[in-house]
Image (cartoon, helix red, strand yellow):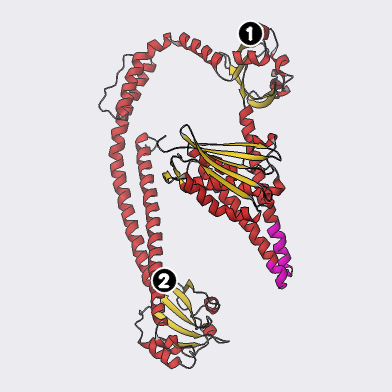
Amino acid sequence: MFKSVRWKFITIYFLLVFMAMVIVGVFIIENLEKHQLKQVSDDMEYRIEEIVRSSAIQQDNWEKSRESIQTTISKWPLKTTETLYILSNSQIPEILASNNRKFQGRKAFECKLLNSALILSALDGQKVDAIISNFDRVNVKEKHLAYPVFNKVGEVKGIIYLVSDLKDVYATIDESKIILTQATLLALLITVFLGFFIARSITGPINDVTIKAEKMAKGDFDQFVEVKSDDEIGQLANMFNYLTKKLKETISEVYSEKSKMDTIFTYMADGVIAVNKDGEIIHANPIVLDLFGLSYDELSKKRYDDLVRPLNEKLTLEYIQKIDKWEGSEVIEYNSVIYRAKFAPFKNENGDYGGLIVVLQDITEQQKLENMRKEFVANVSHELKTPITTIKSYTETLLEGAIDDTQYSMQFLKVINNECDRMARIVRDLLQLSNLDFKQTKWNMTKISVKELIEETLKRTEIFAKEKRQSINVQIEENITEIFADKDGILQVILNIVSNAIKYTPEKGKIDISVKMENDNVVITVKDNGIGIPEKDLDRIFERFYRVDKARSRALGGTGLGLSIAKQIVEAHNGDIKIRSKYNVGTEVDIILPVVGV
């Protein structure tokens, strides 16, 4: 009975509702607990801050004013579930006051109701809290909050330590769990009841189709199913009737389908060779003929093994029969083109292996992309390895004793900080590239004045140009139209290009920035007389982590990702970026962006 579709439907409904109720229950309980605990924490902090503002607590010497503090605490309106302690900042902290007077005058570390770790952290000036099991009642949890109070010179003069019993909070949570459990059981009961009737309405018509399909299997093709609805079951009935009508026609179309298959083999993008068990080529499409430069007649006269043995011995029929592995794939290279050769057997009418079909798939571009991926991974690993190695070595040196030498320790920490900043820049750029790759970047598209972008760029980069005594000349045509773009994104692109020009142009160099209209585009050109880029590197300049001079780029703080990001941003704005350069002469970069309305 439970193997039927009806009971499978009911089981699925049951499990779906059960899982949904469990997920919702867990979500509600977790959020309820977080909310309750946050409410307790907020209330505790609020009460402590009120106490801190009291005149007794404002006094600098708590030791002398302990009676005044005790009087204040005794009158303070605390909850019945809360216990307040005022601790001194002495060599051995003492409980100066408490709303429970029996603890007054006791040593704080000897009081098992207080947490020593929280006290020590508070003495260091940290506001800390924790949920701790009650010393006397293990199953009861308490919220502990240690709040340091500072004197006028910023030193900790004492601690306000507040403990709140959480039994009411967890009692509320337990009640919520019971209610959710009851709701889940009720929902499951209703699900089983409704699921039974829903499943029966689905499986009834399916049973009818099954009975008539059995009659068709025995040769009675005059079977039609009554269509009672327009849903999927009705569609199934319509399809059954359609199949019944078309079955005889299908038999006559088999020969036509064979012709279609021949056409597919002929015009498919991959090469296909079929050979019989004796190694004779019985079929080859034009891709294979072009690959080997043979006509079909010439190819059919050749033995398959003689044809493929020079490419890969493992593709020969002799080798396949020897190891008795009739299915697999091999990668071959022929005339500078890389192919993945997939082979599988076809069977004759007796069910035995009748021969082999080999499909040759051109994966040259795919292999190129895979190599680029591997190179990218290697570059990322290398870029992160260097700062990590530096951080590790300097950290080990500090741990071995150099930390006691103030001069060296500060120097080492600055190096570690710089390397961390470098890794952060790499990760930030990688995340931005990832967002650009997956179209997850949200652009704030507005009308932007290109002149304002250039002025903002100059404000941020002029100081670096002045340090190298470089001159920056700007020329903007009068008729420049506004562009419709994300201001921060385009500003990042221009800043990157101008910063690169400053970095790679020697002292007293010259940088020209011009803006002009070309057709319906604004063209921003940045030209320098710097070190330039060798011609062989121009095609790869936008690749990630690609550097013309790796040592110089790292020394100048580059991540190797700036131009890749710039290109992605410009292309996301339906623009383009072009680079022209001559080694030791200079570089010229065009940022091409469409104007508003285009």
Vertical arrangement, residue 255 with respect to residue 243, above or below: above
Assign a secondary structure to mark 2: helix
x and y percentages locating residue 63 in the rendered image = 49, 91
Residue 275 appears in the figure = no
Taking the spot 67% from the left edge, 27% from the top edge, the residue there is 331
The quarter of the displayed image where residue 30 is located: bottom left
Which quadrant is the C terminus positioned in?
top left
Observer-nearest of 31 and 441: 441
**Quarter of the image where the N terminus is located:** top left
Q: Amino acid at mark 2?
A: Ser
Measured from the top left, where is residue 123 in percent x and y? 54, 79
Instruction: Please state which of residues 108 and 468 is positioned toward the viewer in this rendering.
Output: 468
The alpha-carbon separation of the residues under discs 1 and 2 comes to 84 Å
Residue positioned most to the left: 228
- Indicate left or right for 390 with 284 as reference: right
Q: Are marks 1 and 2 in contact (CB under 8 Å)?
A: no
The residue that label 2 is drawn on is: 41
Provide the residue designation for mark 1. Answer: 296
Amino acid found under the numbered disc labelled 1: Tyr
Does the magenta run of residues contain 409? yes
Left or right, 569 with respect to 528, comes to left
For label 1, the crowd category at 10 Å Cα-Cα, with few meaning under 14, some 14 to 19 and many 20 or more, is some
Q: Nearer the viewer, residue 75 or 280?
A: 75
Answer with the quarter of the image where residue 225 lies. Answer: top left
Q: Position of residue 54 (x, y in %)?
A: 39, 84
